Image (cartoon, rainbow, N blue to C red):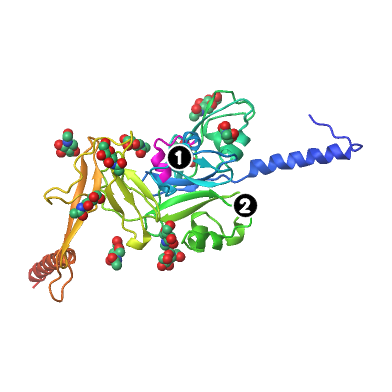
Amino acid sequence: MVTISTKTPLIFISFCILLFSIIDQTLVESKKFKCTSNIQQCKSIVEYISPNTTTITTIQSLFNVENLTDILGVNNLPLSTPSTYTVQSRQPIKIPISCLCSNGTGKSNKVPVYKIVKDDGLYHIAFEIFSGLIVFQEIQEANNISDANKILVGQELWIPLPCSCDEVDGERVVHYGFVVPPRSTVAGIAAQYNTTQDVLLRLNDLASANDLKAEDVIDVPLKACASSISENSPDYPLLVSNGTYALTAQGCVRCKCDAANNYTLQCEPSQFNSSVQRNCSPLQCQGSGSLFIGNSTSSGCDRATCSYSGYNRNGTILTTLEQSTCPAPGQGNNASKFNFNIWRMSFIIIAFHLMLFCIQFT
Ligand SMILES: *[C@@H]1O[C@H](CO)[C@@H](O)[C@H](O)[C@H]1NC(C)=O
Ligand SMILES: *[C@@H]1O[C@H](CO)[C@@H](O)[C@H](O)[C@H]1NC(C)=O
Ligand SMILES: *[C@@H]1O[C@H](CO)[C@@H](O)[C@H](O)[C@H]1NC(C)=O
Ligand SMILES: *[C@@H]1O[C@H](CO)[C@@H](O)[C@H](O)[C@H]1NC(C)=O
Ligand SMILES: *[C@@H]1O[C@H](CO)[C@@H](O)[C@H](O)[C@H]1NC(C)=O
Ligand SMILES: *[C@@H]1O[C@H](CO)[C@@H](O)[C@H](O)[C@H]1NC(C)=O
Ligand SMILES: *[C@@H]1O[C@H](CO)[C@@H](O)[C@H](O)[C@H]1NC(C)=O
Ligand SMILES: *[C@@H]1O[C@H](CO)[C@@H](O)[C@H](O)[C@H]1NC(C)=O
Ligand SMILES: *[C@@H]1O[C@H](CO)[C@@H](O)[C@H](O)[C@H]1NC(C)=O
Ligand SMILES: *[C@@H]1O[C@H](CO)[C@@H](O)[C@H](O)[C@H]1NC(C)=O
């Protein structure tokens, strides 16, 4: 029960302000991304803005990122970056998260797990520690906490960060989630990340560009490079966006994406000397002699490229030798000839059946 005396207007006003701020917080929109594709797991990225000056390993452990190299790759920092690398307060840094889609929504898959310390509150954890990437009600719901004020020191909370694995307009993308800074516009964000206003409005369920508010979490699709990685490979779909790289195949292979290379993933042996490097299985294409992953040979217009195509759980690295030969006059390369042959075969078969059909009725 609260009784308000009209003789103390100041207290009354304070009370109203408090009430409105509580209502404002409870009406705050959830920060979830749509995820309806049949690819249920992938890597996604969130932007983190640390409230204080800290090190990259502190951030790594806050987000439970298993390998530092994953953070280095999405930020395009050199592999030699030390774990003591300083991140300034308010300096944005990209965090790779493993995303799981279910029920039409993407959420970081069981990570990060945050352990409550003395004087923590859910609002502080959501708004400050995780820089507003989530609202406290979502932490509350995900952890089945009935009273937000009753949390215990040492209690572990799952922080379900927004993410997605959906393709956008038929293209593989890395979904990048970040908190909208004040005075941003949809057009400005679209231009900055080489996408369109229309795509941003659609992905984020915004009716118009005026509906964008500071502190919203926005889903920005970054076009990813195409690769020849097999669907059965544990790293499928390896989503790498322009200007970034990723280590894969248990650290043995490094793949980078460059828009200038027609958005085709370029992979090569990582030659990364550290404790994370395992004994790598042969990184040569079978039957190609000396071609390693990423190598190609050409003589005239004949060309052979050894491409990375995944790995399997026992550590075997898979490769494909992509060969193209000189186009015969008036024809495409081997690949299109092959396709052409399939079409011609189908056509002949269909024509044959039509003929049989006609014969039956004459
Ligand atoms: C920075 O803030 C985080 C989270 O609030 C805290 O865990 C960490 O100890 C702080 N680091 C420094 C150097 O103050
Ligand atoms: C999916 O959504 C339905 C209805 O919205 C709900 O009953 C169900 O518990 C949800 N499942 C999961 C795994 O969240
Ligand atoms: C959430 O908590 C309530 C009450 O403590 C309990 O009955 C319910 O089973 C819990 N749900 C989940 C999904 O843990
Ligand atoms: C993205 O950048 C490429 C190359 O700069 C450009 O050709 C393309 O039109 C851009 N796409 C959008 C949607 O702006
Ligand atoms: C790709 O990344 C490079 C380097 O980060 C940048 O200069 C270029 O503008 C980007 N291109 C597109 C199309 O995003
Ligand atoms: C981390 O690196 C190790 C060794 O390179 C590798 O086996 C493991 O799969 C990596 N973990 C993730 C989540 O990428
Ligand atoms: C770029 O890649 C696309 C699909 O991967 C392909 O169809 C196209 O021919 C390529 N263009 C060039 C110039 O290589
Ligand atoms: C990696 O380590 C081997 C020996 O363990 C050394 O010969 C080689 O030069 C190192 N490569 C790099 C790039 O540091
Ligand atoms: C093959 O690739 C490796 C590693 O990327 C490189 O060191 C080597 O020089 C390349 N060999 C040829 C023949 O291109
Ligand atoms: C690894 O698995 C593949 C099939 O998945 C098999 O062909 C290969 O022999 C295995 N390699 C080892 C070293 O067990």
Figure quarter occupied by ligand 5: bottom left
Classify residue 358 as left or right of residue 156: left
CA separation in Å, label 1 and label 2: 23 Å
Residue 289 x, y percent position in the rendering: 12, 50
**Which of the marked residues, 1 or 2, is nearer the chain's N terminus?**
1
* Residue 164 horizontal/vertical position (percent): 44, 47
**Residue 163 placed where, x, y %?**
46, 45
- Residue 198, placed above or below residue 251: below
* Residue 65 within the magenta-colored segment of the rendering: yes
Question: Looking at the figure, which quarter contains the C terminus?
Answer: bottom left
- Dot 1: what SS? strand
Q: Is residue 4 left or right of residue 342?
A: right
Residue that carries the numbered disc 2 in the rendered image? 214
Q: Residues within 10 Å of mark 2 (few under 14, many from 20)?
A: some
Q: Nearer the viewer, residue 168 or 306?
A: 306
Q: Which residues are magenta?
A: 63-72
Location of the N terminus by quadrant is top right
Residue 307 in view of the camera? no
Look at mark 1 in the image and give the residue it sits on: 108
